[in-house]
Amino acid sequence: MFSKLISALVPGAGTRHGILIVDVLVQDRGEKCMLKPKALIPGDTVALVSPSSPSTAESVEKAAQAVEDLGFRVKLAPGCGEALGYLAGPDEIRARDINDMFADPEVKGVFCLRGGDGATRIVDRIDVKTVTENPKVFLGYSDITVLHAVMNQEAGLCTFHGPMPASDFAGKTFPGYVREHLMKALCRTEPLGDIRPHESDPPLETLVPGVAEGELVGGNLALVCALLGTPWEIDAREKILILEDTDEPPYRIDRMLTQLRLAGKLHEAAGIVLGQFTNVKPKNPKRTFALKEIFEAVVAPIGKPTLLNGCFGHGDYKVTLPLGARALIDGDACRFAVLEAGVC
């Protein structure tokens, strides 16, 4: 495995000869190459898009200010002000904004305002060719998991599982740990290295010992399951599978993990990191299981190196992880490390 910077010739609208030269870092894996976007620098323009649930005008304004406070210019996609039921506008508008922002030469990064619901409805509307020809930093989590799947697996682009402007940037816990990990992931070309939970959160814990290395893949458990049986079904083969969720009772977490087991996804993975499972409330408190009991019953028997308490997901203190970059699990040492950067 090695990395190299190449100049890729791709069709480019508006160029003199119809050709656009794009510098990208690719990882030679034998079967595929992952595109890496260029690292963001102060003054770069970042587009805000809303592919899932709607945000209030006040929330959008605060999110834009928070991104500017990071040192970036902000470009609001037209659909940021849309609302249609529990969606941030019609499917065609939400997809159009993502495609247009990737095509826009002024834009260097695309941040999803928030998650919620509805991104699954636009996965087949993403212009994969445009994404591939214009690799940019793409950031989000939760419902955005399905868009990561499209961009990772079909476009071959490294994307970023991390905090979002409307959901997190204006929060009290964003300064410090969350902000520092975000900026390191998006703006620096060296690997993140060891990933350790915030001092106020439980430390990493080994569920299954052993050592595993592979590309990071996954995200929200419910959305990973939602893509099973589709063209964007998660490819976990020899990869480090990360999973998290929120607002799900124990029996549903049990059912979804079992679904992944029966679909062969847990067996295929090189290793597994189970992250933040927040607001887990049993349907019947007298007849339930603790989360760890579920993990021990469903995940542990697979025998793959597995860590608990990964610091990603819906918790207050989350890191930003480059999906598609290589990572290491060392269950014997209770260690989780990202071995390469997601930007070049």
Image (tube, helix red, strand yellow):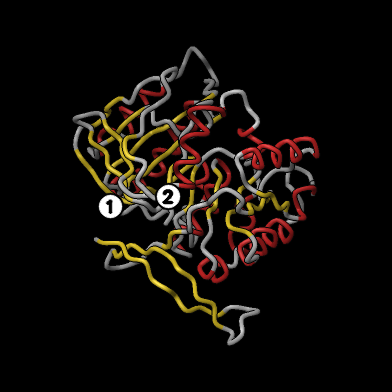
Amino acid, disc 2? Leu
User: Pointer 2: what residue?
Assistant: 323
Mark positioned earlier in the residue sequence (2 or 1): 1
Q: x and y percent of residue 285 in the render?
A: 51, 14
Q: Is residue 228 above or below residue 311?
A: below
User: Pointer 1: what residue?
Assistant: 238
**In the image, what residue occupies the spot 37% across and 41% down?**
192
- For the residues labelled 2 and 1, the Cα–Cα distance comes to 14 Å
Determine the image quadrant of residue 307. Answer: top left
Q: Nearer the viewer, residue 34 or 4?
A: 4
Q: Secondary structure beneath disc 2?
A: strand
Q: Is residue 335 above or below residue 263?
A: above
**In the image, what residue occupies the spot 56% across and 28% down?**
175
Q: Nearer the viewer, residue 294 or 307?
A: 307
**Res 129 seen here:** yes
Q: How many marks?
A: 2
